[in-house]
Image (cartoon, rainbow, N blue to C red):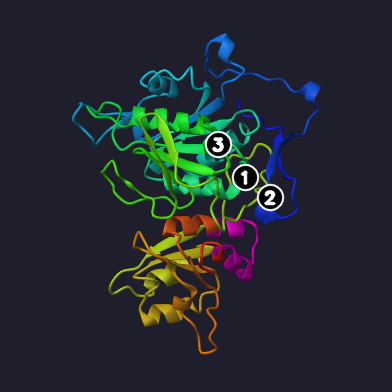
Amino acid sequence: MPNNTLEITTICSDVENSQFTLQSTVPEEEMRVENTTPVIHPQLSQRRSLPRIKILGTGGTIASKAASSSATADYKVDLTIQDMLDSIPDISRICEVEYEQICNVDSKNIDEPILLKIYNGISESLQKFDGIVITHGTDSLAETAFFIESTIDAGEVPIVFVGSMRPSSSVSADGPMNLYQAICIAADSKSRNRGVLVSLNDQISAGYYITKTNANSLDSFNVRQGYLGNFVNNEIHYYYPPVKPQGCHKFKLNIPTGTESFNFPDVCIIYGHQGITSKLLNIVKSEYEGIVIATMGAGSMPDNVNVDCLRVEIPIVYSKRSMDGMIPRANLPRNSNGDSNMCIASGYLSPEKSRILLQLCLACNYGIDEIRHVFRGVYGG
């Protein structure tokens, strides 16, 4: 059950490098713990030595069924966490598991209220568990992972996102193995101090930079920035010592008790294409608090559109429609004085992650210079 008496406070004055802890706002004797979550218990002799893992279920393909065993499309979310755990190998010798079904939806339907539930579920579990696993649809998994990495400092606790590309009913479903590997990764001591991870298709990746690049294949995620290791024959192989994403700005969310949504500032994405004009830009600039443009190439937009962007009085992030590469500051449009006005380079971030980062900046009332400073962490600005 969510505990609305918990709030996040910082124990470090440096916001960018702060560690967040959970503290109660009521005396301990007044708190009542009501645990209705099913628990898988290992043998009594193992309880004290095994890591405790919390699984948060949100739905997605990993929790879906199709009409036949050969179908890999037109499936429906149908399984709970308990159903999925029944399909994986016994983990009672690896860890203790508790789970909570936050929601059960296709990830295309994850909005700010659901994002808040995921955020709260993770925040409330940090000091009680040794690792956290979140089952999630792959369509927007990269966005949720990026948001969580940007708003929660988990300290040493690994937060592992996992999904699948084939439904559970498929003759070669990848969900059970992905979930099994994610639990093992979350329980492994070598996963500590690595921040948000993604376990998919035998690969271990950093959630901050991961991007979905294929709509159908099992090898669906690009991990050019943040390919950390592999899971092979029950062995976890990391290529590097524990490290968290360079330049990741941590935002402290001040969420009042009982709030059901973040109510973020509205930011839209405009997709650049051959023959694009300023028509769409002029339509949305008065309806949104920020704009992200998925530009052609490394920041290329028609000259007349660049001129109009320099006149807009809200932040405009120049991102890219290509999966790889970056937008350097040198490719931003400039006026006769050499100023880019409200235009910002996204660096390595995709349009959808640029949107989230700009929303977080605007929610914290950052000015244009502060926003540029945040995006410089990902080599933009």
Helix, strand or loop at mark 3: helix
Q: Quadrant of residue 63?
A: top left
Question: The residue tagged with tag 1: helix, strand or loop?
Answer: loop
Q: Position of residue 349 (x, y in %)?
A: 45, 60
Disc nearest the viewer among 3 and 1: 1
Q: Secondary structure at mark 2?
A: loop
- Magenta portion: prevailing SS class: helix
Label 1 near label 3: C-beta < 8 Å?
no
Placement of 307 over or under 216, stated as above or below: below
Q: Quadrant of the N terminus?
A: top right
**Which is more N-terminal, label 3 or label 2?**
2
Locate residue 73, reporting x and y percent: 24, 37
Q: In the rendered image, which residue does mark 1 sit on?
A: 153
Q: Nearer the viewer, mark 2 or mark 3?
A: 2
Q: Residue furthest top?
A: 44
Q: Which mark is residue 117?
A: 3
The span from disc 3 to disc 1 (Cα, nearest Å) is 17 Å
Span colored in magenta: 358-375
Label 1 and label 2: CA atoms lie apart by 7 Å
Residue type at mark 3? Lys
Mark 1 and mark 2 residues within 8 Å of each other at the beta carbon = yes
Image spot of residue 238 (x, y percent): 45, 42
Residue 253 appears at what percent x and percent y? 65, 48
Inter-mark Cα distance, 2 to 3: 23 Å
What kind of residue is marked 2? Answer: Ser
What amino acid type is highlighted by mark number 1? Asp
| Pointer 2 residue | 18
The picture quadrant where one finds residue 136 is top left
Categorize mark 1 by other alpha carbons within 10 Å: few (<14), some (14-19), many (20+): many
Crowding at dot 3, Cα within 10 Å, few <14 / some 14-19 / many 20+, comes out as: some
Q: Residue at x 44, y 82 (%)?
A: 307
